[in-house]
Image: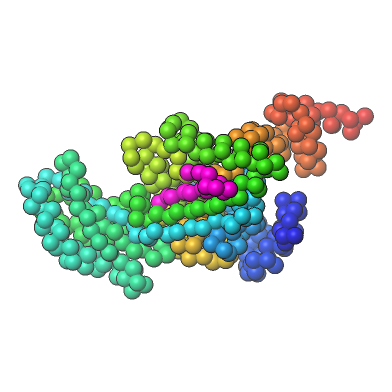
């Protein structure tokens, strides 16, 4: 039996104690979790303008998640009740097979200098390519510290698009997300490019379309594990594959398909202090790279296995930005075992695929609403005005009702209090 068996039934303190023991959390992380330390006001006030306070969201964990033969626990920050439960269930099912694998294709960030009003674009393009070494040296001079850490500018590409001549710079940013590194390097190139081409630079800026930071997550699920009946298991696998094809041909379905993927990705990206807006922007652009917006994942049947795959651009960092400022982010990295940026990117991609599997499995079998509303019952009880002592009772009663909504929760709460008074 797994050490984490029945994890969701345990008390908050029991979950913390188990994580401390199994994941060797530091004393500092233990203190932050026990006292529920949030972002200090003194730090929050320096991170954003017009600061009023801090805004909290649930900080949860998926206890057992297998990637590349190693077990992890995934910290997740989300307000949606069913996300953590669905990811935990998906991870459990897929873990019975072989877990997930992840491949990092490359880890370079891209920036661009957009030039215009150039007398001769074709000639300018040749001049830029001829001066590649000089341009790369200028870029590296703009951020020598990343060069010392083994990173730096790696290549340039030049493309003519409409009235613009665009110079793309690819940089190895090591453990950082790279926005500040890229922007500094690009600014260092801009004047030289203007002089070289006799044109003007409109802007020099990082691109969030991180096509040179692609990550592929895969899993192979024994179809027999999808249901106790072999016939139902086979039917479930076939329906999941069919649902995957629907997301490739219908953008209306693709948008919701991908939203389900990001239920998991965003929760882990947010927990680790990374820029979820940058990740989403790049991924949605990638989903429409051939002119039609499509589902980011695919599911196919191969023999007796259901095979899932997800490829996504992931500009993920383990240092920089707000990562070192937020105490809960430090706990998240402790729970993960202090992964490097490549490992973290692989975990994030695999989490998206896991979340997608759980959603598709629910959709093609019992339907997604039943499980979602079951987990939403406690939230409805609280919204109805239930006290801490009343929440579990109302939630249990609410799950038995035909209509799981706020009106029903209020009615049940009123009846409960009348019974107590009587």
Instruction: Looking at this view, name the residue that lies furthest to the front.
Output: 303
Q: Position of residue 272 (x, y in %)?
A: 52, 57
Front position in the image: 297 or 388: 297
Residue 296 appearing in the image: yes
**Vertical comparison of 352 with 185: above or below:** above
Residue beneath the point at 10% across and 58% down? 127
Queried whether the magenta region covers residue 304, the answer comes back as: yes
Front position in the image: 125 or 377: 125
Residue 359 appearing in the image: no
- In the rendered image, the quadrant that contains the N terminus is bottom right
> Over which residues does the magenta segment extend?
298-313
Q: Is residue 404 left or right of residue 98?
A: right
Front position in the image: 150 or 422: 150
Q: Main secondary structure of the magenta part?
A: strand
Q: Position of residue 288 (x, y in %)?
A: 37, 39
Q: Quadrant of residue 420?
A: top right
Q: Is residue 225 left or right of residue 421?
A: left
Q: Position of residue 33 (x, y in %)?
A: 66, 59
Instruction: Looking at this view, name the residue that lies furthest to the right.
Output: 422
Q: Is residue 270 left or right of residue 284?
A: right
Q: Is residue 196 left or right of residue 249?
A: left
Residue beneath the point at 18% across and 66% down? 133
């Amino acid at each position: 039996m797994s050490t984490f068996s029945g994890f969701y039934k345990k008390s908050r303190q029991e979950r913390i104690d188990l994580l401390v023991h199994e994941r060797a959390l530091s004393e500092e992380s233990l203190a932050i979790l026990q006292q529920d330390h949030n972002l200090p006001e003194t730090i929050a006030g320096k991170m954003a303008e017009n600061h009023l306070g801090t805004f909290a969201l649930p900080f949860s964990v998926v206890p057992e998640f297998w990637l590349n033969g190693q077990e992890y626990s995934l910290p997740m920050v989300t307000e949606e009740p069913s996300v953590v439960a669905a990811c935990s269930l998906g991870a459990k099912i897929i873990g019975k097979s072989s877990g997930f694998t992840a491949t990092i294709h490359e880890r370079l960030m891209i920036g661009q200098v957009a030039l215009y009003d150039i007398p001769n674009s074709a000639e300018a393009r040749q001049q830029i390519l001829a001066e590649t070494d000089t341009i790369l040296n200028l870029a590296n001079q703009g951020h020598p510290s990343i060069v010392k850490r083994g990173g730096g500018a790696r290549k340039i590409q030049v493309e003519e698009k409409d009235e613009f001549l665009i110079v793309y710079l690819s940089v190895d940013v090591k453990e950082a997300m790279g926005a500040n590194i890229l922007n500094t390097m690009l600014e260092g190139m801009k004047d030289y490019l203007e002089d070289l081409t006799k044109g003007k630079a409109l802007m020099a800026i990082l691109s969030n379309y991180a096509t040179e930071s692609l990550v592929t997550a895969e899993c192979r699920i024994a179809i027999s594990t999808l249901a106790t009946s072999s016939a139902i298991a086979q039917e479930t696998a076939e329906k999941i594959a069919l649902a995957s094809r629907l997301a490739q041909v219908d953008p209306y379905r693709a948008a919701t398909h991908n939203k389900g993927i990001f239920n998991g990705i965003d929760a882990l990206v947010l927990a680790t202090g990374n820029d979820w807006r940058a990740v989403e922007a790049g991924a949605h652009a990638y989903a429409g790279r051939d002119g039609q917006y499509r589902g980011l994942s695919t599911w196919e049947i191969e023999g007796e296995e259901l095979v899932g795959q997800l490829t996504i651009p992931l500009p993920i960092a383990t240092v920089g930005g707000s990562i070192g400022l937020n105490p809960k982010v430090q706990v998240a990295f402790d729970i993960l075992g202090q992964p490097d940026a490549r490992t973290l990117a692989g975990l994030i991609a695999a989490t998206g695929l896991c979340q997608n599997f759980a959603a598709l499995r629910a959709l093609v079998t019992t339907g997604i609403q039943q499980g979602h509303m079951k987990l939403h019952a406690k939230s409805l009880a609280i919204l109805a005005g239930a006290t801490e002592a009343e929440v579990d009772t109302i939630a249990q009663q609410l799950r038995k009702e035909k209509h799981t909504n706020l009106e029903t929760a209020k009615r049940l709460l009123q009846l409960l209090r009348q019974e107590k008074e009587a």
